[in-house]
Image (cartoon, grey):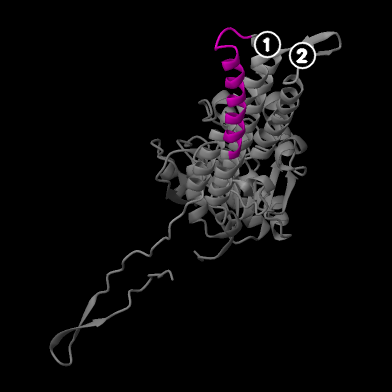
Amino acid sequence: MSPDLEVTVLLPCLNEAETLEVCVRKALGSLAALGVEGEVLVSDNGSTDGSQEIAVRSGARVVHAPRRGYGAALIHGIAEARGRYVIMADADDSYDLANLGPFVNALREGHDVVMGNRFRGGISPGAMPFLHRYLGNPVLSWLGRALFDLQGVGDFHCGIRGFDRDRIRALDLRMPGMEFASELVVRSSLSGYDMTEVPTTLQPDGRSRPPHLRTWRDGWRHLRFLLVFAPRRTLEWPGLILLLLGLVGTATLATGAKKIAGVEFDVSALVYACLAVLVGAQLMLFGGFAELYGRFEGLTRDDRPSRWVRWLTFERCIMIGLSFVAIGLAGTIVALTGWSRADFGQLDPRGTLRLVLPSATAIALGVTGVFSGLFSSLLTLRGMKTAPTVSVPRQINRSSGTGNAVPVPESGVTRRP
């Protein structure tokens, strides 16, 4: 088989003996009908039902994924694929592997990722559970479009999709579970990849056992991934709104009680305003940490972080944090001075708390800011990677009969500068 093919049809497999052969034969038949030089690659995830032998007998190539999990099997399969393009699909005979033409054509047109859309192609009765069809997929697809501007993707979690092998390898995908499906789409979008959709059909799978997918567990994994990978919209913007509302409320109530629409807001409301300031600031900081971590670990390719995130350096956070601490201490000193004038006796809490609460909040913000600078510097601290030591074999000088060592370059070794 040629080492350079056009298409690899990738099937993750874990005990799929009932349906694997028909999937392999359909995919091979489709490639042959299209005149495409390709292969079917089965990434086995530790099957114990003879799936490996069935795959080989049906004409597929089999690789063994060392780590368990849907995503882990696909990541290993992508690394082992020989085709320029990869079309991945489940091995349960639910997707139309006999009709790969739309995916191949879209990939040849230059799209980096080609998603299947089951809602446009047709879903047979019984092929998708009610909760998946009318709640899970619509909600998660809408959330993905809202958080990542994926306006061209209507079926966020379709299991059949094609992509440029090298472009996806460059993303260094890492999610080992079902959330891999979300990671591929989200990180392709964040990296500016060209994405499109083609209609595909969904049939009831041919297995007699329940699917590997678990509705609530895997649904939560997808949701968690989407929220974590959009820190600006899930953490920073809500935090900013809460912080501003808290600041306005604190500044307003620190001078006295206020009546709005016949309702009087006093010290109790001031407590919650100060709380809003603290929670909002921490949400923004957590969002900033998420941005920093994603960029420095290569999880995102966003070269334009939020402007305020650039201020999360150790030195600036120390300066800003100490300033807030100083303001809070100044307010505390004023409050103590007033208390001393009363011989440290009873005071009207409605008066003293208007100064004590904002002062304590400022001190808390300052301490949080100082340690946030330390934490952000730890997130961005990176040492220099050194090249591994390579042992150089010794070659005997036969002509002189001596054992002089002559350096011999080791083939296949790439030395980093």
Q: Which residue is mark 1?
A: 350
Label 2 SS: loop
Q: Which residues are magenta?
A: 323-347
Q: Are marks 1 and 2 in contact (CB under 8 Å)?
A: yes
Coordinates of residue 93 in the picture (x, y in percent)? 59, 37
Q: Earlier in the sequence, mark 1 or mark 2?
A: 2
Coordinates of residue 241 in the picture (x, y in percent)? 73, 31
Mark 2 residue crowding within 10 angstroms, few (<14) / some (14–19) / many (20+): some
Quadrant housing residue 372 = top right
As drawn, which residue projects farthest toward the left? 401
Q: Is residue 158 left or right of residue 368?
A: right
Question: Is residue 381 at least partly visible in the picture?
Answer: yes
Mark 1 residue crowding within 10 angstroms, few (<14) / some (14–19) / many (20+): few
- Residue at horizontal 59%, vertical 12%? 342
Q: Is residue 92 left or right of residue 44?
A: right
Q: Which residue is mark 2?
A: 257
- Closer to us: 46 or 219: 219
- Residue at horizontal 62%, vertical 47%? 311
Coordinates of residue 188 in the picture (x, y in percent)? 65, 50
Q: CA distance from mark 1 to mark 2?
A: 9 Å
As drawn, which residue projects farthest toward the right? 261
- Residue at horizontal 57%, vertical 20%? 336
Q: Is residue 333 magenta?
A: yes
> Considering only vertical position in the picture, is 389 above or below 76?
below
> Considering only vertical position in the picture, is 83 above or below 208?
below
Query: Which three-letter amino acid code belongs to the residue tagged 2?
Result: Ala
Numbered label attached to residue 300: none
